[in-house]
């Protein structure tokens, strides 16, 4: 129920925000309604992101430790850092598979490589993944069950100096803060309009 509630927050925030915006239109303060509506939606979205993406990724973890975690889902993640060797692609035999498999001393796990555009992921799978097999590295991210266990990759630092980053998380942060900033700007516009 907690996962369901957290997952529903942005949608609920959007509906409440739309209601506030409609009320503002009816009361003759359309910008105030829109601003409060955007802030309501942005705040609900922000709370979900804080829950889904715990910020401290520095805790060293092992694969067996993560897999033994019980209270894990797509929404409820365990943050941390894994150290090991890349041993293959997430889907063996699929030549454009962008996901990696990392093995440490306790087991192996899929590193979920996610980017804002599917084409970006496909090009990574086609052009880079094969060259990473056999290389040691440190992966930072979030362990999830979706329903299979996987480690959502934020950054992979390899022993050869390469750093591979994913941009779904920072792009989501940017969009969330843009909605909040827009809400503040719209409220300021309403305050200026009332003052004139």
Image: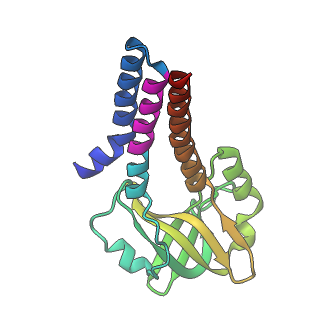
Q: Is residue 55 above or below residue 116?
A: below
Q: Nearer the viewer, residue 193 or 74?
A: 193
Q: Position of residue 103 (x, y in %)?
A: 53, 79
- When asked about the image quadrant of residue 101, the answer is bottom right
Q: Position of residue 168 (x, y in %)?
A: 58, 52
Q: Nearer the viewer, residue 110 or 120?
A: 120
Q: Residue at x 43, y 13 (%)?
A: 28
Q: Residue at x 72, y 67 (%)?
A: 130
Q: Does residue 160 appear in this view?
A: yes
Q: Is residue 33 magenta?
A: yes
Q: Residue at x 59, y 59 (%)?
A: 113
Q: Position of residue 163 (x, y in %)?
A: 70, 72
Q: Residue at x 45, y 80 (%)?
A: 59
Q: Is residue 38 left or right of residue 155?
A: left
- When asked about the image quadrant of residue 22, the answer is top left
Q: Nearer the viewer, residue 84 or 153?
A: 153
Q: Is residue 21 left or right of residue 138?
A: left
In the displayed orientation, state which residue is furthest to the front.
196
Give the dominant element type of the magenta stretch: helix, strand or loop.
Answer: helix
In the displayed orientation, state which residue is furthest to the bottom.
105
Q: Nearer the viewer, residue 3 or 183?
A: 183
Q: Which residues are magenta?
A: 31-44
Q: Is residue 163 magenta?
A: no
Q: Does residue 114 appear in this view?
A: no
């Amino acid at each position: 129920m907690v996962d369901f509630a957290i997952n529903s927050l942005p949608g609920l925030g959007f509906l409440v925000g739309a209601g506030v915006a409609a009320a503002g239109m009816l009361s003759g303060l359309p910008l105030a309604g829109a601003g409060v509506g955007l802030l309501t939606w942005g705040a609900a979205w922000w709370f979900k992101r804080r829950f889904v993406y715990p910020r401290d990724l520095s805790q060293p973890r092992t694969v067996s430790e993560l897999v033994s975690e019980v209270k894990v889902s797509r929404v409820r993640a365990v943050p941390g850092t894994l150290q090991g060797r890349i041993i293959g692609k997430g889907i063996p035999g699929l030549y454009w598979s962008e996901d990696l498999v990392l093995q440490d001393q306790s087991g192996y796990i899929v590193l979920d490589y996610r980017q804002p555009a599917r084409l970006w992921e496909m090009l990574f799978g086609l052009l880079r993944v094969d060259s990473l097999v056999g290389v040691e590295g440190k992966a930072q991210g979030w362990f999830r069950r979706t329903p299979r266990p996987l480690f959502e990759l934020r950054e992979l630092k390899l022993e050869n100096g390469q750093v591979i980053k994913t941009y779904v998380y920072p792009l989501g942060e940017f969009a969330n803060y843009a909605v909040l900033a827009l809400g503040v700007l719209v409220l300021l516009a309403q305050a200026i309009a009332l003052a004139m």
